[in-house]
Image (spheres, rainbow, N blue to C red):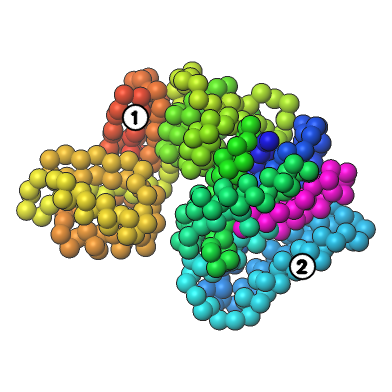
């Protein structure tokens, strides 16, 4: 049994859906395949814009929603020009749920409403893809991921109930896959009260890993618009190298430090079952890509991960006493309270420095809480580069014309928080 996951870039338009169907037809010679698909293109961003407009009571809320609907119906029209396919009504009915929501004033938490609106992107994209696969001779069954992935009610960051999820997948999904190919959604789940939840932004890879683990799949393949896992983002480096083989350990490290090729939560579920993860290019599905397995393969070349828009804060006891365990426990609890994820940290005798993605509102609230007991200094507009299997040459390469504010080294990893020398402090 195999699991394929296609991201938004692979189904951003009608041609993308056609290419997905071509990959399925050419590579899948039997059933026992689950296809997990994200929202189309940048539609999650657009639905987030819709959610914000609705919660803020903006006049253009319905206009944004019309743009969402028109985007999808344009793709449907290209794929089904005779307008007789049931997918037209199926997708329209899916949008009706959001229409009803927008007609009323917001009466629930922002995170709950976010999940009900943004999840529609996955529902609609999978209905379109499934309809096209059936239309072109690849018989598939559309299934709702919310019937299988069960979570708590931590909206936007839902935690999976693994026992119930695996039980439902084995009981209800396995019999379907023994007979035909199935198409389902990434990113979404449901509570015990059947309310829709999401697993965190860009969580479709994680969904695919959940399904693969609970199905005891032979492999998980993630289809990307790159030739595999690269040693650096092409946005930052003119010359990059594909990494043919990667260990689970290094994959977790790269994902944790911010490599966008793999969602950070993806590796653990498949590592626990020793399921290989293949990263392949949907632009050239015959190319080799990257194999991620339990083999202890060190990275053949240094890898670079860049994160921009970083904030760096340094925290000091007001009485110049030592930073001890009690202080750190208090500080970490405040980061958790404000939902701030740390990207790197360093402590000394009387200070504790932390970098994280800069969100102005979260930073302001965090500093307000910290300032009750600590002295706080901070910088924004910074870059963080993480080098896996670094040496001095690689450090010199990324720090040209940079002022280094923080540098943290371990045996295999170096992290540097820095800013351009031309930037006014």
Q: Is residue 86 left or right of residue 397?
A: right
Q: Which residue is depicted at the point 63% across and 57% down?
A: 147
Residue 208 appears in the figure: no
Q: Which segment is the magenta one?
A: 124-146
Tag count: 2
The secondary structure making up most of the magenta span is helix
Position above or below: 326 against 413: below
Residue 221 appears in the figure: yes
* Image mark for residue 92: 2
Quadrant of the rendering where the N terminus is positioned: top right
Alpha carbons under labels 2 and 1: distance apart: 51 Å
Q: Is residue 421 left or right of residue 274?
A: left
Asked if the residues shown at circle 2 and circle 1 are in contact, with their CB atoms under 8 angstroms apart, the answer is no
Q: Position of residue 298 (x, y in %)?
A: 45, 20
Q: Position of residue 161 (x, y in %)?
A: 49, 53
Residue ID for mark 1: 414
Q: Which residue is depicted at the point 78% across and 43% down?
A: 179
Position above or below: 116 against 259: below
**Displayed quadrant of residue 59:** bottom right
Callout 2 secondary element: helix
Q: Is residue 220 left or right of residue 380?
A: right
**Displayed quadrant of residue 390:** top left
Q: Is residue 338 left or right of residue 166?
A: left
Residue in the foreground of this view, choosing between 308 and 211: 211
* Image mark for residue 386: none
């Amino acid at each position: 049994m195999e699991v394929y996951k296609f991201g938004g870039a692979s189904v951003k338009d009608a041609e993308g859906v056609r290419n997905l169907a071509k990959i399925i037809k050419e590579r899948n010679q039997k059933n026992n395949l689950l296809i997990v698909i994200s929202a189309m293109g940048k539609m999650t961003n657009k639905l987030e814009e819709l959610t914000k407009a609705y919660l803020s009571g903006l006049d253009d809320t319905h206009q944004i929603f019309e743009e969402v609907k028109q985007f999808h119906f344009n793709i449907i029209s290209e794929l089904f020009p005779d307008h007789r396919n049931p997918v037209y009504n199926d997708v329209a009915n899916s949008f009706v749920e959001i229409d009803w929501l927008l007609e009323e004033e917001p009466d629930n938490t922002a995170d709950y409403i976010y999940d009900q609106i943004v999840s529609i992107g996955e529902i609609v994209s999978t209905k379109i893809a499934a309809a096209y696969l059936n239309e072109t001779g690849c018989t598939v069954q559309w299934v709702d991921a919310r019937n299988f992935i069960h979570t708590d009610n931590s909206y936007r960051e839902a935690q999976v109930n693994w026992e119930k999820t695996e039980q439902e997948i084995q009981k209800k999904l396995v019999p379907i896959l023994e007979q035909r190919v199935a198409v389902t959604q990434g990113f979404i789940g449901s509570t015990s009260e059947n309310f829709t939840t999401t697993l965190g932004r860009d969580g479709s890879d994680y969904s695919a890993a959940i399904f693969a683990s609970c199905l005891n799949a032979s492999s998980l393949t993630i289809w990307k618009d790159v030739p595999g896992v690269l040693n650096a983002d092409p946005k930052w480096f003119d010359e990059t190298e594909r990494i043919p083989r990667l260990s689970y350990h290094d994959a977790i490290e790269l994902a944790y430090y911010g490599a966008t090729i793999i969602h950070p939560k993806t590796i653990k579920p498949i590592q626990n079952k020793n399921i290989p993860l293949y990263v392949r290019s949907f632009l050239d599905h015959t190319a080799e890509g990257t194999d991620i397995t339990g083999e202890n393969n060190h990275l053949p070349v240094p890898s670079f991960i860049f994160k921009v828009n970083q904030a760096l804060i340094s925290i000091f006891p007001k009485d110049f006493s030592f930073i001890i365990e009690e202080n750190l426990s208090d500080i970490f609890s405040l980061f958790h309270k404000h939902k701030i994820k740390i990207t790197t940290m360093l402590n000394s005798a009387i200070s504790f420095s932390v970098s994280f993605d800069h969100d102005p509102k979260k930073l302001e609230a965090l500093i307000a809480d910290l300032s009750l007991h600590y002295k706080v200094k901070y910088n924004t507009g910074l870059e963080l580069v993480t080098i896996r299997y670094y040496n001095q040459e690689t450090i010199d390469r990324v720090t040209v014309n940079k002022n280094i504010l923080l540098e943290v080294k371990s045996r295999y990893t170096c992290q540097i928080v820095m800013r351009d020398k031309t930037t006014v402090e």
